[in-house]
Image (spheres, helix red, strand yellow):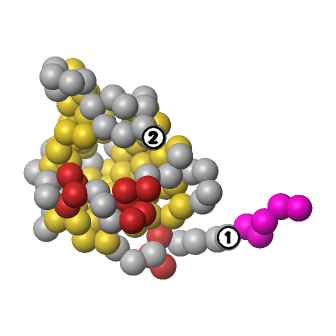
Amino acid sequence: MPEKAELYTWDSIPKENLTPLLDRRVISGDRMMIAQVLLKKDSVVPMHHHENEQITHVLSGTLRFLLGENQDEEVIVRSGEVLVIPSNLPHSATALEDTVDIDVFCPPRSDWLDGSDDYIRQG
């Protein structure tokens, strides 16, 4: 028998302040996770990688991603664009302007859920 559906609004989820320039809100199910990420201009998410597949949809603003072990591939993601990041691909991001994006992860990011994501909190 299916579990009960749950309805959320982003405004009902408290913002988690990670750095002076970066906040997020997270909603997680058993096998997927979605996050609203709010980045001020010049916010940096340092290079990292994770087993989780990631889909980033920029709702407003612009992000510059550097991809690969040597950070030698640059991808600019603008409002209305979506970047799919495969499992374990090293990546970093810089907000070129105030940006709101939606990140979807499969499976959920356990480090985001338990607060052990030091790489982003020090960014």
Residue nearest the observer in this picture, 93 or 61 = 93
Give amino acid for label 1: Glu
Q: Residue 82: where, in percent of width, then height?
A: 42, 36
Identity of the residue drawn at 27% across and 48% down: 61
Q: Nearer the viewer, mark 1 or mark 2?
A: 2
Quarter of the view holding residue 14: bottom left
Element at label 1: loop
Location of the C terminus (image quadrant): bottom left
Query: Is 117 left, or right, of 123 in this rendering?
Result: right
Asked whether residue 84 is drawn in magenta, I would say no
For residue 2: magenta? yes
Q: Residue 26 falls in which quadrant of the image? A: bottom left
The secondary structure making up most of the magenta span is: loop
Q: Which residue is mark 1?
A: 6
User: Percent from the top left, x then y, of residue 118?
Assistant: 22, 58
Query: Dot 1: few (<14), some (14–19), or many (≥20) neighbours within 10 Å?
Result: few
Residue picked out by circle 2: 52
